[in-house]
Amino acid sequence: MRDKVTFGILFLLVFIAMIVLYQSYLFNIAIAFLICVATFWFKTYLHGFIKNPLTTSLVAITLMIALIFIPIFFICYRAFVGFKSLDWNTLREVFDASKMFIQDLLSHIPFVEKYLPSILNEISFSSLSSTLIKISSVIGENGLKFFIDGFVIVIFLFVFFYCGETFYAYIKRLLPFQDKQIEEVAQEVSGTLRIVFLSTFFNVVMQGTAFGIIAYIYGFEGVLLGILYGICSMIPIVGGVIVWLPVCSILVYHGDIKGAVIVGLYSAVFIGFIIDNIIKPWLIGIVNKRVLSKPLQISEFAIFFAILAGIGAFGFWGIIIGPAITAFFIALLRVYEHDFSK
């Protein structure tokens, strides 16, 4: 008994030391682990063609990086080229013309015309340009942090891909549960994350493609705006508004009021409501029934709201964390119902 107490205290101290040691990487490790759970089927599929585990893991990681980071690098490159080629004199002329347009547009509205001149006088091109530079620096800092975190996640994801089966077998030996119970929980969580991964990917592609088409029709660069819209569609609350609202503003500035209304309604109603709130839950159900070998006993609406709750609680990575926590909780409830409540 004394040896067990001593071992328990020693293990607890070492465990705390491990947490302190890897504190800076715990969140990235957790994200890499959840991504591995969601996409391990892809690595298993590749292993049917590439028999070497190391090569399979490298190929899987490379393809996932290409899928995720190449569009982001494309946007960053185009943003850098666009910012570098800016003509500040032309921007000043556009800014002054925009102020005059807003003043003419709002000058006939009661209670607004009285305060409009003072408000517009406080907005100057120099203050706007300094604000844009500050925003650019903040975006640059956060973007650098995102890529650093992404690099760390990729490293741990490779480790989990390569050692995943061994790690899973070891955990099964350590846990004081039956293999059937562990398999039930693991299948529920991995299946849910697989649904989330595939449905999110298809949703981003659908929204980006839909907006890219309408942007191309009205003379914008459809590929760039489509990719940007697809990425922004995963941002909580605002989503694609970040993209379609400036596009509508540009159309209004050029006098195409009808085009601005069409783009705004198309983006808000068809993309933002129909695709995101109707087609996406339906797509989750399709993936659950057609893609998984054994459909999960969890509602597609529960997964949908778990994604929303996860985004609200954890930001971007809540897309994975929210459904994982929800699926884990439901799986534990089922294990308790089957094995411990009788």
Image (cartoon, rainbow, N blue to C red):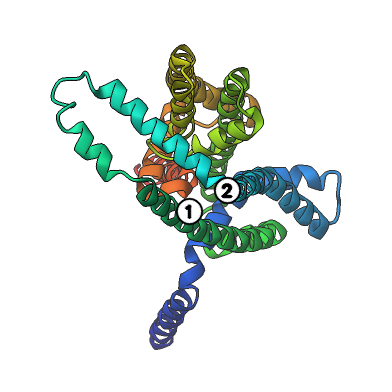
Does residue 9 show up?
Answer: yes
Q: Secondary structure at mark 1?
A: helix
Q: Which residue is mark 1?
A: 136
The local secondary structure at tag 2 comes to: helix
For residue 315, which numbered disc appears in the image? none
Task: Count numbered badges in the picture.
Answer: 2
Earlier residue among tags 2 and 1: 2
Where is 13 relative to 212, above or below? below
User: Which residue is pictured at 67% across the width and 63% down the height?
Assistant: 159
**Image coordinates for residue 34, horizontal then vertical, percent:** 55, 51
Give x and y (percent) for residue 215. Answer: 58, 23
In this rendering, position of residue 326 left or right of residue 68: left
Q: Nearer the viewer, mark 2 or mark 1?
A: 2
Find residue 208 and report its horizontal and vertical position in percent. 58, 29
Where residue 148 appears, x then y in whole percent? 57, 63
Image quarter of the C terminus: top left
Q: Quadrant of the N terminus?
A: bottom left
Asked whether 215 or 100 is in front, the reply is 100
Q: Is residue 305 visible?
A: no
Disc 2 from disc 1: Cα separation:
10 Å
Check disc 1 and give the amino acid type: Ser
Instruction: Report the residue at 36% width, 40% height from top.
Output: 309
Circles 2 and 1, Cβ within 8 Å, touching? The answer is yes
Determine which quarter of the picture holds residue 154. Answer: bottom right
Q: Nearer the viewer, residue 334 or 257?
A: 257
Q: Identify residue type, mark 2.
A: Phe
Q: Which residue is under mark 2?
A: 83
* The one of 247 and 227 positioned closer to us in this rendering: 247
Residue at 46% over, 37% down: 93
Bin the neighbour count of mark 2 within 10 Å (Cα to Cα): few under 14, some 14-19, many 20 and up.
few
Classify mark 1: residues with Cα within 10 Å, few (<14), some (14-19) or many (20+).
Answer: few
